[in-house]
């Protein structure tokens, strides 16, 4: 895709003046003309659309700047009804393309249909697409200035407006900032102080300015890490009664010159804490996190900053790689094992199960965990000997270790010393095609040829590869071009699933997660999509499962746990579903989530092969199966015929399947699946691996 195409169909400016919306956007002049082209508003989930003509403002190097003007009063019949309008550009050849946007052009704009008491406003989706929504009046608000004090106080400044006040604002308005944590939804309230309105953009000239002081010492800082989100609540008296309005999670939209991210070391609860302020995901919600302060992590971050400032950073990297290679010629440290899980982000999966077995049965080994410094908090309290990834200490330990154990690829540049045995545990039974078996690669910053070459080059370093069954062994040989020792042991991470767990144990786990004991648990664990990403290693995910419908249909009997893939970057706001939906994507050990759940909802994720060990019902929510099967990955077997549970495409079908399956008995289809993929799982996989690799 050319640079020109990347710049196409993106909004440059969006303005609402009086009763008109002015939309300016870029598009390729060769594909769009003012005579045949148009801007289309499509009402979501319907065939209804509105057509608006275009004017060309300018054209530079074949890239045109176009403008459409939308008269809202002329279209009030359509736009004043609740709904979402998706925006398309109609091309000369009658094809149409979605119009993309950004937070910059949609921030806090709206139009108020007073007669219908509806508000019409632009919005940017998680995919970056421009839409317009119509709803009941909302409290529009944002934070634009943040100041962190060393004593744990944070000063927030922002502005707000409520459409119903346009004709006559209340004489007396009071407000509160509500601070809510992500652990037990504890709420703290802080009063607002009105401020004189500063010079802001014209479209928010009617907004009121406020300031508040947040005392972080009121939080729960005995915990290792806690995140706060914020709401604005306004109280006022109209002609009839006292009213109270609570807004959506507050946006963080820094003014020009302000930073998007802030951090400071503060004294809170008689100890040093790291306070971070940032915008959360694509939603732009204000997020403040408080976590323990680690000198090692600070040292790593300071070093990283220095590296960024040093123009000759490539020379330093070259020296680091050279030093690794030289140290690799030193004598090996016998019985030393370095473990790593999911690029150093988690204490989980097969490496964790192998580590725990060794700790309990073989004290002669010295063990370390390779940890990405940004995720050190995930390893607190586990009693592990952690080493920050790519530090000098890490270099000397990795280069002289007797064994490496990892469940994902190590960086390509790391030279494996001759004395090191590399055990690759991998992390799933393959359904979707892997590595050399893939037809096309849609991941960022790579192409098909480069991805396969790099994958296979790193796989040559593996000395052992764990396989959960014969089926996987054959695929691993093909996909990884692996011709060394494959250990058909079952997956060590599934050993825990073969043990008996009393109801008392399961109830204790539920209590740990603050899940109601009387409710059944649905575990939703989907995989990632190769072509939906923010950047390399950060993937988007649109939650197609409608939690509102799910709660309405199942909320009396069930709760739902969301467990996203470790590559997915989304942070979902589940506050509207408090007490029903829980996001445990960042909880490292999915095995415990398996144990407390009564049913699994997934798609093409390999979690269903592991969950099959429990012989509990599974539902496959495959709304995009045609695209995933035929374009993105492709499958190794006929998934639609073999899947050990119903395949559904809508939330309504998910609800129906849950009702149908809750009393289900494993079918012959499920038994065939179990006998093919789970037959090796007997609770002794870790022992078999340790005997083969470390004790042989």
Image (cartoon, rainbow, N blue to C red):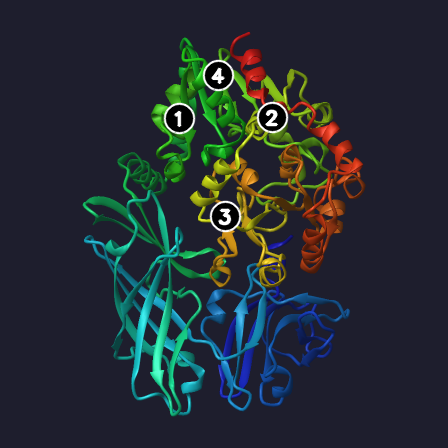
Can residue 201 be seen at all in this image of the molecule? Answer: no
305 left or right, relative to 343? left
- For mark 3, give the secondary structure: loop
535 left or right, relative to 451? left
Check if mark 2's residue and mark 4's residue have beta carbons within 8 Å: no
Q: Residue at x 60, y 24 (%)?
A: 459
Give the mark nearer the N terminus: 4 vs 3.
4
Disc 1: which residue: 320
- For mark 2, give the secondary structure: loop
Q: Is residue 4 above or below residue 170?
A: above
Disc 3: which residue: 517
Q: Quadrant of residue 193?
A: bottom left
Mark carried by residue 491? 2
Q: Is residue 648 above or below residue 589?
A: below
Give the mark nearer the N terminus: 2 vs 4.
4
Q: Quadrant of residue 362?
A: top left
Give the mark nearer the N terminus: 1 vs 3.
1
Q: Position of residue 531 (x, y in %)?
A: 63, 49
Q: Position of residue 341 (x, y in %)?
A: 49, 31
Whole-number angstrom distance, CA of label 1 to CA of label 2: 35 Å
Whole-number angstrom distance, CA of label 1 to CA of label 4: 21 Å
- For mark 1, give the secondary structure: helix
Give the mark nearer the N terminus: 3 vs 2.
2
Whole-number angstrom distance, CA of label 3 to CA of label 2: 30 Å
Mark carried by residue 403? 4
Whole-number angstrom distance, CA of label 2 to CA of label 4: 19 Å
């Amino acid at each position: 895709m050319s640079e020109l195409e990347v710049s196409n169909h993106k909004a440059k400016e969006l303005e609402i003046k009086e009763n008109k919306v002015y939309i300016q956007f870029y598009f390729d002049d060769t594909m769009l003309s003012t005579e045949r082209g148009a801007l289309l508003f499509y009402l979501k989930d319907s065939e209804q659309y509105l057509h608006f003509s275009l004017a060309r403002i300018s054209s530079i190097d074949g890239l045109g700047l176009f403008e459409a003007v939308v008269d809202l009063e002329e279209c009030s019949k359509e736009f004043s009804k609740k709904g979402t309008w998706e925006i398309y550009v109609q091309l000369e050849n009658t094809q149409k393309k979605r119009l993309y946007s950004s937070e910059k052009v949609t921030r806090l704009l709206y139009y108020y249909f007073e007669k219908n008491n509806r508000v019409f406003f632009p919005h940017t989706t998680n995919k970056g697409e421009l839409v317009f929504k119509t709803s009941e009046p909302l409290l529009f608000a944002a934070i634009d200035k943040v100041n962190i004090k060393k004593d744990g106080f944070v000063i927030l400044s922002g502005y707000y407006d409520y459409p119903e006040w346009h004709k006559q604002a209340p004489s007396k308005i009071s407000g509160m900032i509500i601070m809510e944590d992500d652990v037990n939804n504890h709420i703290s309230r802080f009063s607002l102080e009105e401020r004189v309105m500063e010079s802001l953009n014209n479209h928010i000239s009617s907004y009121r300015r406020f300031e508040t002081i947040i005392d972080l010492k009121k939080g729960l800082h005995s915990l290792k890490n806690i995140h706060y989100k914020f709401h604005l609540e306004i109280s006022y008296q109209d002609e009839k009664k006292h009213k109270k309005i609570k807004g959506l999670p507050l946006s963080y939209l820094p003014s020009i010159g302000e930073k998007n991210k802030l951090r400071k070391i503060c004294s809170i609860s008689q100890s040093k804490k790291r306070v971070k302020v940032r915008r959360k995901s694509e939603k732009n919600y204000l997020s403040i996190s408080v976590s323990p302060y680690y000198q090692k992590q600070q040292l790593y971050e300071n070093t990283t900053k220095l590296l960024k400032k040093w123009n000759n950073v490539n020379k330093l990297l070259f020296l680091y790689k050279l030093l690794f290679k030289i140290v690799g010629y030193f004598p090996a440290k016998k019985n030393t094992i370095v473990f790593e899980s999911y690029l150093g982000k988690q204490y989980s999966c097969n490496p964790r199960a192998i580590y725990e077995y060794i700790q309990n049965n073989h004290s002669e080994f010295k063990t370390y965990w390779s940890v990405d410094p940004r995720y050190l908090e995930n390893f607190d309290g586990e009693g592990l000997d952690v080493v920050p990834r790519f530090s000098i200490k890490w270099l000397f330990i990795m280069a002289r270790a007797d064994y490496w154990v990892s469940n994902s690829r190590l960086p390509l540049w790391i030279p494996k010393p001759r004395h090191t045995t590399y055990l690759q545990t991998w992390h799933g039974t393959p359904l979707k095609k892997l590595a050399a078996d893939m037809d096309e690669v849609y991941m960022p910053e790579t192409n098909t040829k480069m991805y396969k070459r790099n994958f296979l080059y790193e796989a040559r370093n593996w000395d052992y590869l764990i396989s959960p069954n014969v089926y996987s062994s054959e695929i691993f040989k093909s996909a990884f071009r692996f011709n060394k020792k494959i250990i058909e042991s079952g997956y060590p991470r599934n050993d825990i699933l073969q043990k008996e767990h009393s109801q008392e144990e399961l109830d204790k786990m539920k209590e740990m997660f603050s899940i109601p004991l009387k409710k059944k648990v649905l575990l939703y664990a989907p995989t990632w999509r190769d072509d939906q990403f923010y950047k390399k290693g950060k993937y988007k995910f649109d939650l197609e499962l409608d939690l509102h419908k799910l709660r309405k249909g199942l909320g009396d009997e069930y709760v739902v746990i969301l467990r996203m893939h470790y590559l997915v970057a989304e942070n979902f706001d589940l506050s509207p579903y408090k007490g029903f939906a829980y996001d445990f994507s960042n909880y490292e050990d999915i095995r415990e989530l398996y144990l407390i759940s009564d049913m699994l909802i997934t798609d093409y994720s390999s979690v269903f092969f592991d969950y099959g060990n429990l012989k509990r019902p599974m539902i496959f929510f495959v709304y995009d199966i045609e695209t995933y099967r035929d374009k993105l990955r492709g499958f190794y077997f006929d998934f639609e015929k073999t899947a050990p549970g119903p395949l559904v495409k809508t939330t309504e079908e998910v609800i129906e399947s849950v009702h149908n399956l809750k009393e289900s008995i494993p079918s012959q289809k499920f038994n065939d699946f179990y006998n093919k993929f789970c037959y090796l799982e007997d609770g002794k996989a870790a022992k078999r691996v340790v005997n083969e690799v470390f004790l042989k």
